Structures are given as structure tokens and as C-alpha cells.
Amino acid sequence: MLVRPTSRTACGTSAATSLSKIRIPMIVPLRMVIRRGDELNVVVASDVSLRPITVEDWPAVHEWASTEEACPYQPWGPNTPAQTLAFAEDAASAWRQEPQSRYVWVAEEGAVVVGLGELKIRSHRWKQSEIAYAVKVGQWGRGIGCAIATELLTHAFQSCGLHRVGATCDPRNYASAAVLARVGMVHEGRLRQTVQIQDGWRDSDVYSILVHEWSSPSPHR
Ligand SMILES: CC(C)(COP(=O)(O)OP(=O)(O)OC[C@H]1O[C@@H](n2cnc3c(N)ncnc32)[C@H](O)[C@@H]1OP(=O)(O)O)[C@@H](O)C(=O)NCCC(=O)NCCS
């Protein structure tokens, strides 16, 4: 996820602007939605929020994108500083594209960047999309991954009106598989040798959730 280039959108900039800061749930499914001007803030029990990535976020992202631990199952990394900077530049510029197909947020706890979430619209016509996420090394197991994935689905279905959200993960990536299952995504099957990563060809488990299977706003099902 960290070094791929950008493409374009369906939800349009108004949805992107309205979701410029999203408060996301960690433990408690109950949440309130409060509109403040152009912002849609979903206030919940924790102090984690999503906001669109900026170029200035690259050093914070690089803290974990440069580690072996973050990317054993990924086609990227460990990143060089130039690769993380290029990722942040591409991801930030995607927010200015019209139509927009790529949405990358950073997850913040207080003022600290603790993760990333990405929604990519693969087909505007058929309302198909894909999500990906990463949590800062050292912050795993605290529910941040589930919280990010939950908000990505909310954005996909509620703001973008998409029909299907997919995700892929390495069959060895148990934590990611647990996140996908936890947010209600269905395991569809396994694609063989889809990506060449550090230790060879990687299979990809495919997950999806359809709009009628998704029920907002429960983060933990
Ligand atoms: C995958 C990742 C995002 C999970 O983030 P996280 O914040 O630790 O996830 P959560 O705390 O929300 O935990 C989600 C689930 O994973 C489980 N889990 C966490 N670490 C695990 C591990 N090492 N093995 C098995 N399950 C694990 C948790 O128990 C939880 O399951 P549960 O709700 O059924 O109890 C994080 O490990 C990460 O960033 N990995 C590197 C990047 C990556 O692989 N991204 C996914 C690309 S497909």
C-alpha cells in the first residue's frame, strides 16, 4: 500500500471534504455523528481519528514503513525515505483529483499518527472497491486495525454509495484476516501466486462485503 501510485474517484470532493476528520470507534459500537461546518465527526469512546494524509505525514509513516516487521507480507518495503515520501505525495495528491478514486487517511491518536487506511475505487460504473490498512508497529492488538477498517467501510458504503468492498491478504497474515472477519467481510477464496514479495510468490486470500451485508455503524460484529 505504501508506494503505489495514484488514480481517480466516484464519491467526489464533497464527500471527501465532509470526511476530512473522522472520529473512529475502538471498543464501543455506539457513536454519535456531529456535523461541524464541512466536517463530519463521528465521536466515540476512544481518541483515534482519521484525517486525509498530507505530504508532511511522511516521517511519521516512515517510522514503521521502514521496518521489516511492518511488511513481511507486502509488495512494498521496508521503505527508503524516498519511497515513503513518494507514497505520501501520491496519496495526498489523490485528494485533489476529480473524480477521486483513491482515499488515504492517517489514523491519529491525539496528535500521534498510529496507522493508515486506504479505499480505492476500482470501478465507478460497477461500484467496486478495495480497502487496505496498516497500524504502526508497537500499537498492534489495540483495536486500531478494526477501527480503521470499520471507517473505511462506512466511507465506502455511506459516503461513496459503493456496492462491493474487497480486500486481499497473505494467508499467513492472521492479524489482517482477523480484522477483515471482524468487520464482517467474507472469505471468498484464494488466488495463487498473485504478487512477488521478499520471500517469493505470495498467494492472496480474497475477502469482500456487499452493501446489503453491511450495517452501519457497528464496528465489532
Ligand atoms: C494487520 C494489522 C493492521 C492489524 O492491526 P491491529 O491494530 O493489530 O488489529 P486489531 O488490534 O484491531 O486486532 C484485530 C484482530 O487481529 C487479531 N490479531 C492481532 N494480532 C494478531 C496476530 N499476530 N495473530 C493473530 N491474530 C492477531 C486480534 O486478536 C483481533 O482479533 P479479534 O478481534 O478476533 O480478537 C497490523 O498487524 C498491521 O499493520 N500489519 C502490517 C500491515 C498489514 O499487514 N496490513 C494489512 C494488509 S492486508
Image (tube, helix red, strand yellow):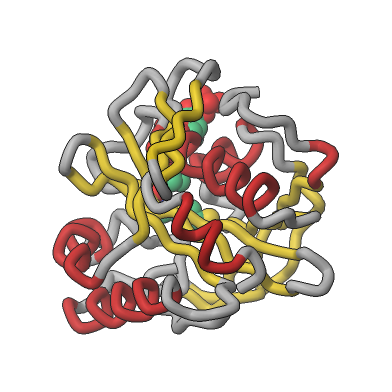
Q: Quadrant of ligand 1?
A: top left
Q: Compared with residue 220, is residue 169 higher up or lower down, i.e. above or below?
A: below
In which quadrant of the rendered view does residue 79 lie? bottom left
Residue 100 falls in image quadrant: bottom right
Front residue (pair 161, 82)? 161
Identify which residue, 159 or 156, lies in the foreground.
159
Relative to 121, is 156 above or below? Answer: above
Q: Residue at x 58, y 49 (%)?
A: 155
Residue 8: horizontal and vertical position, in percent?
57, 80
Can you give x and y, in whole percent of width and height, for residue 174 in the image?
A: 53, 42
Q: Is residue 209 left or right of residue 25?
A: right
Q: Indicate left or right for 66 with 218 as reference.
A: left
Q: Answer above or below: position of 58 versus 213.
A: below
Quarter where residue 160 is shown = bottom right
> Which quadrant holds the C terminus?
top right
- In percent of width and height, residue 150 lies at 55, 38
Residue at position x 48%, y 16% in the image: 28
Give the camera-side residue of 73 and 86.
Answer: 86
Identify the residue at horizontal 32%, vertical 62% (top origin): 53
